[in-house]
Image (cartoon, rainbow, N blue to C red):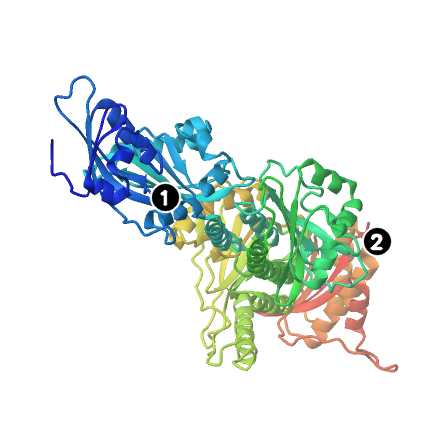
Amino acid sequence: MEGRVPEDLAVVVDADGAVLVWSAGARRLLGYEPAEVVGRSALTLLAADLPLSARRHLADGQRWSTEVALLHRNGDRIVVRLQGIPLADTGDRPLWLVTGAPRTTVAGRDQPGAATLWDLTLAQLPTPVAIYDSDARFVAANDAMSRIMGLPAAEMRGLTLSEIEPSFPFDEYDRLQRQVLRTGRTIFHEQHAQAPGETREHSWSMYFSALKDDDGTVQGLSAVVFDTTEQYWARRHLAVLNDAGLRIGTTLDVTRTAEELAEAAVSGFADFVTVDLLESVALGDEPEPLTPGEPVAVRRAAQRSVLAGCPEAVFAPGEAFHYPVNTPPTRTLLTGHGTRHRPGDPGMQEWLRTSQARAESVARHMIHSVLMVPLRARGVTLGLVHFLRHRTPESFTEDDQRLAEEIVARAAVSVDNARRYTRERRTALALQRSLLPGRPPGLAATEVAYRYLPTGAGADVGGDWFDVIPLSGARVALVVGDVVGHGIRASATMGRLRTAVRTLADVDLAPDELLTQLDDLVIRLDREEGPEVPGRAEAASAGDIGATCLYAVYDPVTRRCTMARAGHPPPALVTPGGDVSFLDLPAGPPLGLGGLPFESAEVELAEGSLLALYTDGLVETADHDIEVGLGLLRRALADPAAPLEETCDHVLHTVLTDRPADDIVLLLARTSALDTSKVRTWQLPQHPAAVAGARKMASEQLAAWDLTDAAFATELIVSELVTNAVRYGDGPIALRLIRDASLICEVSDGSSTAPHLRRARVYDEGGRGLLLVAQISERWGSRQTPTGKTIWAEQPLPA
């Protein structure tokens, strides 16, 4: 005999299980007299089956130890820790010494014992519990486990999990159980699946724990299962909400924001999602108020499905349609609160009857749950979001509705921000483009091409501008400017400066004088828009408005170009031979500083030269400085013979290595020289007799140009202009005729006194000259010259 024999119980049992010896301790513990027990089978004393591990060790003749429920003579159950020890030298049929001590003493029939209460607890525990032996075969389970397995315990006894349910994930459970039996360590496992005895998926948290005896030997295992479906959906909802917060609102584009909302919603929440915006919102306007009793015009902005291609959709993205009156969508929009529906609901049936395609889609895809949530932001309704389920078996719950409303509320703010931004940007761009020139005029002096690129980085529009202004004498003015800052304010300032440049150009100011006048204007604008202007900081200081500008005047008669710049990048000059250089013009201060002079520089251009004017957004970017940008521009302009439109595209492709962060203007002008045969100049004496001679010379020249139809009007213009120069001007006097896109007549003299148009009285002998010139010519004017002034008049060429 091995070990110490407890005094409480000692029984000798033969190989057939018959009791041979019944001790006094056994009598005291179970209440049976020896005569009542000896010779009987020990199995009749069991209140529950002997554990499988004990039976296996009995068959193998090995020592065993386990807890056993025994039956007291009065009917009570007593849990006893028994130990079976095989006795030596007993022949072929061994005897067993069974000893043990009670875990629970008898409490009487009216007071259930702890063992009884323990058994009742396990049986009635709402948490599923099952026990498996050392071979991972089912031993017992409570009612909760039998219910989720869909089988009674008797049918599962002796089977492994993979034999009970030969499918995933039970094969994985079986593997985990065997790992527990092998290692003795508890394993925690989570699974979202449908149990055999359940009609829908649940989230299960499982603990597989080893059952060990006093010696630490693994005798089996227990499986305890907790239904954590609510926690699972709470985590899923939180994950969906977090994912929506990360996905939605990454851009300021209304359509893309709607797509982000749909994408986030089908990632673990709904099977099909549509986002419909009110028609007015989709068009970028303010949302129109909803009127009860009228259909609602909407436009599909986005849709997403767990199925490829969104086969559930009835309308395509971008398609406009109406929600019928008194249907769930219109009622949801009017109430402003989310609603849940099933296809069988009366309201849904009415809505489905309005569209056979919708009814067929619901039936074909077995859509069983619909959730509608208005897209509202800042108290304004923007549209409606539909969430539908057909692959997910669970219908939308009240918690789902709250989650959907939270997602949609966040998305609505982003949609409204994108809508407002789009509207304001569209307004700013419309303003900006309205202030820019249209197609450059056809000029004999130059061939012009340009590119204007508003920034695409999401910032407000800027204040870059350019202009091509025809001047008198077949000349042309080229101007490029850049107002500091972005937004409507910068665009408005740009428009005022461009208008000022055109006005000053009409006066024919020299480039340096024009920039001086423009500098004064910027200073006045800055003073007018002081801190009291709404939107400007109280501490705003002078100099908030600033700009740069380059102004150039090209004369095709002399082939000379006069330029001045105010803090602007220097222009590039490409000779007909392909040499590229940046003209060394006096830099000049930016506009708006005041008190600093501007200087003009004059260069003579060979016919066919190319001038490139641009703003700093072209050559100065985040990934390289201005020197690198100028080098790229120099390389891009190396082919002077290429068509200007192709050269513009080539420059942008070469210089811009990334998406521009600032507005870009590029203006290319290829110069021409006016043929000397189209220009005729005469020096005239300061004498009244010069008038007749001037008329005669002009008439002869028109005959040479085959423009005799214009002779009468031209002679009248020449007569009046020369008469004014002789009478009111100083010498020297010159007459010049230019045949260009129009017929130009110019008379120059040494006086700087500007002429002015006046209305003569009935009996006045003079004062009608300029009035006649203005009525006969298409346009007329005067300009200052280094030696005096020039009065000019233009006539259209005869057909």
Vertical relation: 305 (above or below) 379: above
Q: Percent position (x, y) of residue 131?
A: 36, 37
Q: Farthest front residue?
A: 35
Q: Which of marks 1 and 2 is nearer the N terminus?
A: 1
Viewer-nearest residue: 77 or 684: 77
Residue type, mark 2 in image: Asp
- Three-letter code, disc 1: Gly
Q: Which residue lies furthest to the top in this view?
A: 92
Give the class, few, some or many, for how many residues have Cα within 10 Å of label 2's Cα (few <14, many ≥20): few
Which residue is identified by label 1?
A: 75
Residue 7 point in image, percent of width and height: 16, 42
Q: For residue 682, say whether it is visible.
A: no
Residue 451 point in image, percent of width and height: 57, 50
Question: Which of the labelled discs sits on residue 709, or is there none?
Answer: 2
Q: Is mark 1 on a helix, strand or loop?
A: loop
The correct choice, above or below, for 595 with respect to 721 in the image is below
Q: Specify whether 334 is left or right of 237.
A: right
**Residue 670 image position (x, y, % from top left):** 57, 48
| In the displayed structure image, the side of residue 9 where residue 656 appears, left or right | right
